[in-house]
Amino acid sequence: MPASASRLLRRPLPFAEGGARHRIGVRPIEPSEWLETSGDDVADQVAEKARVFDAHRAAVLGVLPAAEEACAELRDLVREQLPAGWTVAVPAGCHPLEEAGRLVPEDFCVHLPDSGTGMLTLTAGCVCFPNRWSLLDKLGHAVTAIHEPVPRYDPQLARPVERLMARLPEGRILERHNWAVVESGELHAPLRTAERAREWSGVDSDPWLRIERTTLRRLPRSGAVVFTIRTLTAPLDVVDADAQAAGLLADAIRDLPDEVAGYKLGPPGARSALLERLTRALPAS
């Protein structure tokens, strides 16, 4: 269920500023842009989320008692934004957060202040499409701890992200994009980086570009900060066919610090293999 090339490579490209810069990079969006309910991969992703819920519900849905009110509020907000005629079957009596997750392609993480420390904490989540992480490993942890495996996150992004989320006013929605090159188009990919297929070199097994469009918004009644993840994937062929995108991705991969390259690309050989492939896609100078 790949995204269309036009959607996956929508400008500005998430890797257009190179790989060396490690910053938040958010931009404000309109409320109407919060969820993506159109696109040639949306119906397939919603169907895949239903399959993942049915097969892995205990691993992809987690709710602490403090988040119950916020989950119901989030479900109502999602329903309000659905376009007329939107029909998705949801099991009767399912949890409000599961209902929200089954309705749209986005995954949801709900954060509330910890009663003891006051730090924003992941108190509920519906994450059917994790990229090498597990929701249950993160539930109940503060924002900084959630991102612990991300190279260079703590010294460069931890405090700014925490401040951004804590001070986010109701009515303001922020968007950013992440990118990685992965070994398949599998959306439900909870494996950690170290557990990637050992034989994957970054080119042999038809790598895929994976882009995550994420948003932050504060719910008006509960005050919870909701983080959404909309996952877009397609074979790297879509980049091969776009010379500008291929050049920018090659530059970003070339610029990545080694530890970040390992996180975004996989084994050490992936960088050189991907650069060789992307260079072939560029027009001869």
Image (cartoon, grey):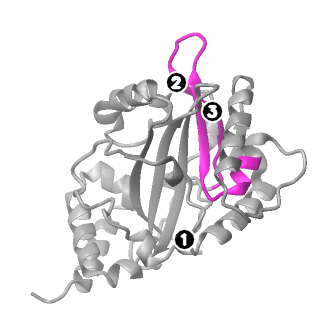
| Residue ID for mark 3 | 139
Crowdedness of circle 1 by 10 Å Cα count: few (<14), some, many (20+)? some
Crowdedness of circle 2 by 10 Å Cα count: few (<14), some, many (20+)? many
Q: In the figure, residue 6 lies in which quadrant? A: bottom left
How many angstroms separate mark 2 from mark 3 (CA)? 12 Å
User: Which label's residue is closer to the chain start, 1 or 2?
Assistant: 2
| Left or right: 86, with 144 as reference point | right
Tag 2: amino acid: Leu
**How many labels were placed on the picture?**
3
- Residue 156 locus on image (x, y percent): 28, 34
Residue 114 visible in the shown view: yes
Closer to the eye: label 1 or 2: 2
| Residue ID for mark 2 | 120
| Residue ID for mark 1 | 185
* Span highlighted in magenta in the image: 99-128
Tag 3: amino acid: Leu
Outermost residue, bottom side: 284
